[in-house]
Image (tube, rainbow, N blue to C red):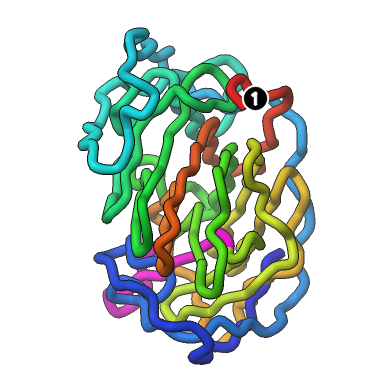
Amino acid sequence: MLALAAACSPASPPRSSVPSDRGGSGGGPDGTGGGKTGGTGGAGGTGTPATTGGSGGKGTDGGSAGTGGSTTSPAADAATPGDAATPSDAPPGNPAGCTAKLCDDFESYEVGTQPGGNWKAALDRGMLAVHEEKAFSGARSVRFTHQGAPAVMFIELRQPLLPLPGDVVYGRLMYYLKQTPSGQYSHFEIVRGSGPLAGDKRAQLNTGGENGKVVVNYEPGDCTKYSKVALPEKRWACYQWAFNVAKNDIHLWIDGQSVDDVPVAPAGQCWKAPMVLDTLHIGWESYHGNQPVEIWIDDVAVGDQPIPCPTGMPSKP
């Protein structure tokens, strides 16, 4: 399990402030900025998700199959920065084999639009839209891009899907990162869970990377722990997570392999789980540096049980 009995020291500069949960590490009204030095934490829990299984579809269990998006698509770069992608009203479908609470392979949304249905876009100096250049399954994925930090580009799940029973949120996605940002303070996040704390504050459970390695971060307090596990780039990779509010646990898996050297410990002076995890943020947030970012995300699945990585080769590598 990812354990962070992290210290909070001024080893890194304050991160940019963006409203609400979009603030990320050190950002937003809860973010205080602070250190990058992590201590050690307790050992993780047991069990890992299976590493085989069907690729994610889309929709919630029991939903009717969605209709496909338009087969006449804009040019491949239709969702470049500066374009104003609009949300798609197409409902996500429920392909055979999807057993999670929500699965989405983004095939039902029109190219150039933001995913609709349960998804809400959160953007600040970043862009996102359904795209056809790359896909792990099918023909489409969501492309997230920005031309320099600070930038936010998330698709978010809230009510009615969240919170889940038992307040444990498992998830899985496939991502293709064109190039990992490099350099000191090149911290970024791919998946974030958030929820309320006492006193009108919000906790953020942030997972992502820095300098090509896995990073876990907690806000408020900017408690950060660094892993030696590499985040793959220039290929499709499987990213799995578990946020367990009751146990104050964060657990990550990369390509089905447990990341065990960045635990987030409940005893740390900077750590306190939210009262309930009511929002899931998927996409990208960067804090420093002028390097452009391009990442594709496909086959997202969210539920209250471990979700396996899909099998097979990507349809558009």
| Residue 168 in picture, x, y percent from top left | 55, 53
Residue occupying the point 53% across, 88% down: 11
Is 73 drawn above or below residue 116 in the view shown?
above
**Is residue 202 rendered magenta in the image?**
yes
Is 198 drawn above or below residue 294 in the view shown?
below
Horizontally, is 38 left or right of 278 in the view? right
Horizontally, is 196 left or right of 177 in the view? left
Residue occupying the point 75% across, 44% down: 256
Horizontally, is 108 left or right of 10 in the view? left
- Check the image and name the residue furthest to the bottom: 9
Is 144 drawn above or below residue 36 in the view shown?
above
Residue occupying the point 39% across, 14% down: 66
- Circle 1 sits in a helix, a strand or a loop, which is it? loop
Q: Which residues are magenta?
A: 194-209
Corner quadrant of residue 276? bottom left
Question: Between 63 and 315, which is closer to the camera in this rendering?
Answer: 315
What is the quadrant of the N terminus in the image? bottom right
What is the quadrant of the C terminus in the image? top right
**Is residue 152 rendered magenta in the image?**
no
Residue occupying the point 29% across, 50% down: 122
| Residue 159 in picture, x, y percent from top left | 33, 45
| Residue 210 in picture, x, y percent from top left | 58, 65
| Residue 65 in picture, x, y percent from top left | 43, 12
From the image, tell me which residue sits under label 1. 314
User: Mark 1 is on which residue type?
Assistant: Pro
Examine the residues drawn in magenta and state their main secondary structure. Answer: strand
